[in-house]
Every structure is written in C-alpha cells, then in structure tokens.
Amino acid sequence: MKNVMILTGAGQIGMAIVRRMGYGMKIIIGDKKLENAQSISKILNDAGFDTFPLEMDLSSRTSIKNMISEAQKYGEIKMLINAAGVSPSQALIETILKVDLYGTAVLLEEVGKVISEGGVGVTISSQSGKRMPQLTAEEDAMLACTPTDELLSLDILKPENIRDTLHAYQMAKRCNEKRVMAESVKWGKRGARLNSISPGIIVTPLAIDEFNGPRGDFYKNMFAKCPAGRPGTADEVANVAELLMSDKGAFITGTDFMCDGGATASYFYGPLKPKK
C-alpha cells in the first residue's frame, strides 16, 4: 500500500505540482475527459511516476465519491490537488457555478472526510475572485458554511443575480476561498491542512483560450501592466504549492496565496485600475 495523491483536472498546473510532490506516491488523475487524464498520466508515468487515470465529473458528488473509492484501493489519501474547473470563455453561467463553485465545495468536503493525518490539500482558485466588489460578512459566511447541497439555492448565486460568465467565475472563486477557510477547520480535526492558490495569468491551454476569446485584449493588457510585466508559468504556481504542501508549510492552513505577478495590486492601485 502507498500514500495516495488525488489530482483533479489534468492540466499544466496540476501536472507541475505533481512533479514536485508526487514522487513515491500512487497518483489518481481525474478529469472530465478521460483522454486528458490518460495523456497526462502517460507523460508522468514515462517520467517515473505511478499514476492511474480515470473519468471524473467535478459537478457530480457520485463521480467524486467514485474517484475517492478508487484512490482508497491503493492506500491512505495523503494529498489533494484540485486543479479542475472551467473558465468564463468556456462555459455557461450555470456550468461555471455547478463545476467551479459547487463541485469544488463537494470535493473539499468529501476528501476532508477521509484525508489521512498529516495530509494536505491545495485547490487552485483565481485572482479573479479578488477583483469583484466585496461581499457582506453575512454573504461570505453563507458561501463558507452553507451545506453543499444548498449552495446553489443561495439568492446571490441565482442566475438572475449573476450578470455574466465572468461574474459567475468571480463568485465561484470567492466561494472557493471562503470554503477553504471553513473546511480547513474540519480538516484540522483530522490533523490535515488545506489552502488555496489564486494564480494570475498563467500560460496554459485554458489561458490561451482566454487570450483568443472575447476578453483576450483585457487579459493581454493585464499581464502587460502588472508589475511583473509578463504572464506566469505553471511551475511558478507549483513553487507556491510546494511550500504549502511540504513540511515548510506546516503552520499554514485555511488561507489563500496570490501568485499573480502583482496584477491585483495594479488593478486596485496602479495602471490596471478601472477608469470610472
């Protein structure tokens, strides 16, 4: 039996983190498209890792539980990397809320029930959640603590109260951040830790979709005018994950780390600040 890592979302960021943290472990790779999971699995196996790909739909509790059951066949679940999700240019409002918001909440809840002592999880959120107007303390608390099956019934998440897919994505990412805080308290009772990372513009196939989508100029302007002056790489996100998931991060739980080249700082106090 081995310690087991679960990776959801077979993309560049997830694979970069696996390369830092997954050696010696059995790695279960779940993705909505089995061929994506198989592709990443082959790359990692050819590099000496021990992976198993499977189809997993983040919007389905049954699918998430099936993935966890498969993982438990190999040993105790020690690590979770949640890098699954859809972007504003890829999906409808309802899909973004069902996958990025509800699905992430269910995944953190279900893995939190079985994570082993000393275990650790990281979920990939987004700087985008920082750019929307502040919610009230009561709204934040509802996003953090509402039972998962009731989340999508909240007034603030009803389709008529969501302006567009970007707003849906921002709400999902705000919810991710608050959910990590609340779930980390539960994970702590099992001796485990949970954090999130909010990347900025990272060059991945998903980001390239955005560059070529209706908000492409917006995103190109964002990385041009952020302090770093460039987009980031998946390996730079993995640098943060390595800190959070290693013993060096032993006192870090229930928090979100931004890795955005300063884009959010520029959005509030620099050249990216929206003109009124």
Image (spheres, helix red, strand yellow):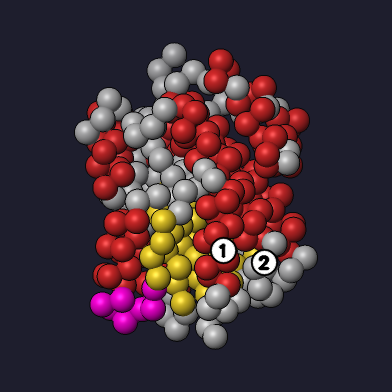
Callout 1 amino acid:
Ile
Q: Which residue is mark 1?
A: 68
Residue 57 in view here: yes
- Label 1 Cα crowd, 10 Å radius (few <14 / some 14-19 / many 20+): some
Q: Is residue 150 magenta?
A: no
Q: Position of 47 compared to 139: left or right?
A: left
Looking at the image, how many numbered discs can be counted on the residues? Answer: 2
Q: Residue at x 34, y 60 (%)?
A: 37
Residue 260 in view here: no
* Quadrant in which the N terminus is drawn: bottom right
Q: Which residue is mark 2?
A: 114
- Residue 135 at x, y = what percent? 65, 28
Give the quadrant of residue 186: bottom right
Q: Residue at x 69, y 57 (%)?
A: 184
- Label 2 Cα crowd, 10 Å radius (few <14 / some 14-19 / many 20+): some
Callout 2 amino acid:
Val
Q: Residue at x 47, y 79 (%)?
A: 25
Q: Which residues are magenta?
A: 45-51
Q: Is residue 112 above or below residue 144?
A: below
Q: Is residue 155 above or below residue 101?
A: above
Q: Are marks 1 and 2 in contact (CB under 8 Å)?
A: yes
- Residue 28 at x, y = what percent? 45, 68
Give the structural element (helix, strand or loop) at label 1.
Answer: helix
